[in-house]
């Protein structure tokens, strides 16, 4: 069963506008969430994370929002830049599962100049 | 220059042959992981190791084997029992085996079985 789901395989936005990437999860034991960015033929790189005790975490142009009641998180990128074009994965972990991460399927973001 | 290295970047093997993918890290991380990525799918955990000489199965361990004899190294063997081995394989490590630790990834190895 897919415990972390990214329902949009792709998203296209104009440079300078906001990109919003969404992620839903089903396992209520998840209490730490991460976003990774991946370019083709490379390994993912860590972007930003959020603990379940918070509902927002911001780092420069990147902000992650967590809605625990809806089991939903989102990544906002403002302003979007062409270099942001990549696949974005959300991932989740649970205190009870040690360091294991469960990943979503990924969303391909394309930022058009 | 700390990081994770995976070699080779591209690997071709004939069906029925075992193949070993290399993963080395000089970050002094305790935990290491192997993932597999297929088109349109997320990363799926194959095996992970939280400490030297110990490892656990992930979600899709069948047809794979690992060893963790040294802290820096976590090789993955894809055996002939793996039914669909063609994929992009990613190795990762984290400082501790803690649920709040971010994982750092290597560049990946693309395995093609002919």
Image (cartoon, grey):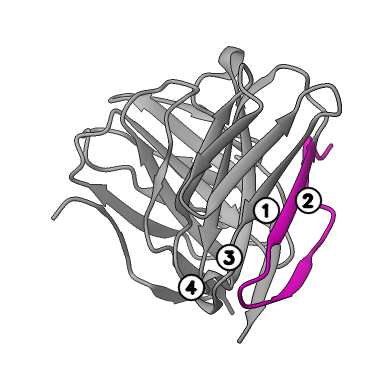
Q: Disc 1 designates what residue?
A: B42
Q: Disc 4 designates what residue?
A: A41
Residue at far left of view: B1
Instruction: Give me the disc on residue A79.
Output: 3
Q: Residues within 10 Å of mark 1 (few under 14, many from 20)?
A: many
Q: Chain of mark 4?
A: A
Residue drawn where x is 25% and y is 50% of the image: B24
State the CA–CA distance, disc 4 to disc 2.
Answer: 21 Å
Residue at far top of view: A96
Up-down relation of residue B17 to residue A103 (above or below): below
State the CA–CA distance, disc 3 to disc 1.
Answer: 26 Å
Is residue A3 within the magenta segment?
yes
Expressed as whole percent of the image width and height from the top left, the position of residue A98 reads 51, 19
Helix, strand or loop at disc 4?
loop
| Sooner in the amino-acid sequence: mark 4 or mark 2 | 2
Residue range of the region highlighted in magenta in the rendering: A1-24
Q: Is residue B5 left or right of residue A9?
A: left
- Asked if the residue at tag 2 contacts the one at tag 1, i.e. Cβ–Cβ closer than 8 Å, the answer is yes
Occupied quadrant, residue B54: top left
Q: Nearer the viewer, residue B16 or A8?
A: A8
- Asked if the residue at tag 1 contacts the one at tag 3, i.e. Cβ–Cβ closer than 8 Å, the answer is no
Expressed as whole percent of the image width and height from the top left, the position of residue B111 reads 51, 70
């Amino acid at each position: 069963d897919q415990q972390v789901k990214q329902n949009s395989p792709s998203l296209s936005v104009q440079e300078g506008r906001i990109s919003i990437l969404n992620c839903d999860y089903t396992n209520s034991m998840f209490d730490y969430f991460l976003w990774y960015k991946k370019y083709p033929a490379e390994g993912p790189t860590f972007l930003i994370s959020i603990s379940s005790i918070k509902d927002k975490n911001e780092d420069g142009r990147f902000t992650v929002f967590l809605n625990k009641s809806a089991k939903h998180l989102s990544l906002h990128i403002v302003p979007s830049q062409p270099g942001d074009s990549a696949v974005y994965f959300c991932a989740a972990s649970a205190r009870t599962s040690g360091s294991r991460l469960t990943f979503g399927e990924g969303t391909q973001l394309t930022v058009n100049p | 220059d700390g990081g994770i290295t995976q070699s080779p970047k591209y690997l071709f093997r004939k069906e029925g042959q075992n193949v070993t993918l290399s993963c080395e890290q000089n970050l002094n991380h305790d935990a290491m992981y192997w993932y597999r990525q297929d088109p349109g799918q997320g990363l799926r955990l194959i095996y992970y190791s939280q400490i030297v000489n110990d490892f656990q199965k992930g979600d899709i361990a069948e047809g794979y084997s690992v060893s963790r004899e040294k802290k820096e190294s976590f090789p993955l063997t894809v055996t002939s029992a793996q039914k669909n081995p063609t994929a992009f394989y990613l190795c990762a490590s984290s400082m501790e085996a803690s649920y709040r630790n971010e994982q750092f990834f290597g560049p990946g190895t693309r395995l093609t079985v002919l």
